[in-house]
Image (cartoon, rainbow, N blue to C red):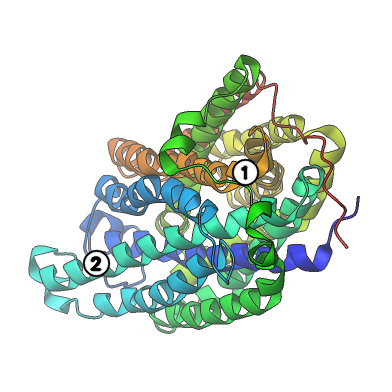
Amino acid sequence: MKLNWKQTALIGLGMVFISLVWTPYNLFIPLFLQSGDPIFDALHKVSIPGFGLNAKFTGLVMTLDNVAAVLIVPLIGVWSDNTHTRLGRRLPFLLFSTPVVAVTFSLIPFTTLMIRPAFQGSISGNMGAFVLFIAAVGVMLVGMQFFRAPSRALLPDLTPSPLRSKANGIISFMGGTASVIASLWIAQSFDVQPWLPFVIVAVLLCVVTFALYFGLRRSVTETHDLPVEAEPKQPSIREMFANTFDLPKPHRSSLIKLLVAVFIFSIGYNAFETFYSSYAVAKLGVTAGQAARQFAIALIAFLVFAIPAGFIGERFGRRRSILAGLCIFTVPVLIVVLVPGLVINEIMLAAGGLAWALIEVNTLPMILDSAPDDSRSGFFAGLFYLTNQGAAIVSPIITGTIIDWMGRDYQALFIVTSTTFVIALIIMVFVRRGEARLTKTAPAK
């Protein structure tokens, strides 16, 4: 059985889209929210227009997108499973969401230009700008939920089970490449004009979806041309939820443990991702663009190791690969907490990127192959995002609260990351299902 590399690369454009959005979003939105706060401004030298929130309330705002994801993503996954159009099941959602995301994402920084200098750091003095900022973020994030689950469901739609870790490695490699490009080049334009990286990304999103549509439209619409009787009967949304855990007890128990572990280590990684730019600006004294360049060390390490991580998961097992990744990530993070320093920080970023490749590349295939078959793949892809986004709801709030409690010490994010990874590692030891299923699917040509 051979992997269709061209088709997998086209599927990976969905992850490129997602990475292009989340990289500048996680780097710059916390800076817009916190700039203008006297404590935060005292820690860095660069002037950024902002609303003056503390770390806890910044974390609260950063969870709004995740609340929308928890409520919407599983339903979108089921909806796409039950959709039958001339464009297939997934493409209509991608084509609808792209212009919504592109337009609203590009508008976000322009709302901060409405902040009056005399009221820098004041929501009450810039209520109109703040309302428009939240509205643009909110609509963009709802649009992202219409893109995410259907785009990720293309993987099980077009890839046999035994090849999914390898395919997901390629997809993650492409997402990592997009993140590196966004961090090393696109994000640097923030130091020129804060709105520039957002506009560049918006244009690229349209190009990516255009390429994905024309590359996959024949593959994803083949089932539309089959006779009606050849179409498998899709269960209703109610049946999907009712039967999700209707699995043999060992499988159900393992799936629950897996989802709990994913939830916990996602809290740690989200803390790292959300507040690293604030840590770099406040503790290391760099600009926002330089913080993005630093974070690119982790992204490059992830990129280099994404495809090997898929092969490792295929060769040694997905669970073992995730366990190894959790161990590798935790050790340097603990060292940074105990012995902070620039060199140690860079080693931590490199090790963290490598380790996260082992974790992320093998997590989604484990969840997908916990299902009895592929008829509910869209829902199980949505279940993955439900768990991930659930963690992302609580993570910024917990981390922000701890940062404020420790006197606005952004090094607290490393404590959150290391603690959650150790707990997740212990739970993952008891996961027994989710490896590649045997399949009779014909090999890709």
Estimate how packed mark 1 is, as few (under 14), some (14 to 19) or many (20 or more) residues with alpha carbons within 10 Å: some
Q: Quadrant of the C terminus?
A: bottom right
- In this view of the protein, can residue 411 be seen by the observer? no
Q: List x then y, in percent, for residue 90.
A: 56, 62
- The residue pinned by badge 1 equals 375
- In this view of the protein, can residue 296 be seen by the observer? yes
- In the foreground, 283 or 170: 170
Q: Amino acid at mark 2?
A: Ala
Q: List x then y, in percent, for residue 267.
A: 47, 38
Q: List x then y, in percent, for residue 8.
A: 75, 62
* Residue 335 lies in quadrant: top right
- The residue pinned by badge 2 equals 135
The numbered dot on residue 393 is none
Single out the residue that lies furthest toward the right: 1
* Residue 39 lies in quadrant: bottom left
Q: Does residue 443 appear to the left or right of 236 in the view shown?
A: right
Single out the residue that lies furthest toward the top: 249
Q: Amino acid at mark 1?
A: Ser
Q: Nearer the viewer, mark 1 or mark 2?
A: 1
Residue visible at 59% across and 80% down in the picture: 210
- In the foreground, 246 or 301: 246
Position of residue 42 relative to residue 240, above or below, is below
Single out the residue that lies furthest toward the left: 124
Helix, strand or loop for disc 2: helix
Q: Does residue 48 appear to the left or right of 155 in the view shown?
A: left
- In the foreground, 332 or 422: 422
Q: Earlier in the sequence, mark 1 or mark 2?
A: 2
CA–CA distance in space, label 1 to label 2 = 36 Å
Position of residue 382 relative to residue 114, above or below, is above
Residue visible at 60% across and 55% down in the picture: 152
Residue visible at 57% across and 23% down in the picture: 257
Helix, strand or loop for disc 1: helix
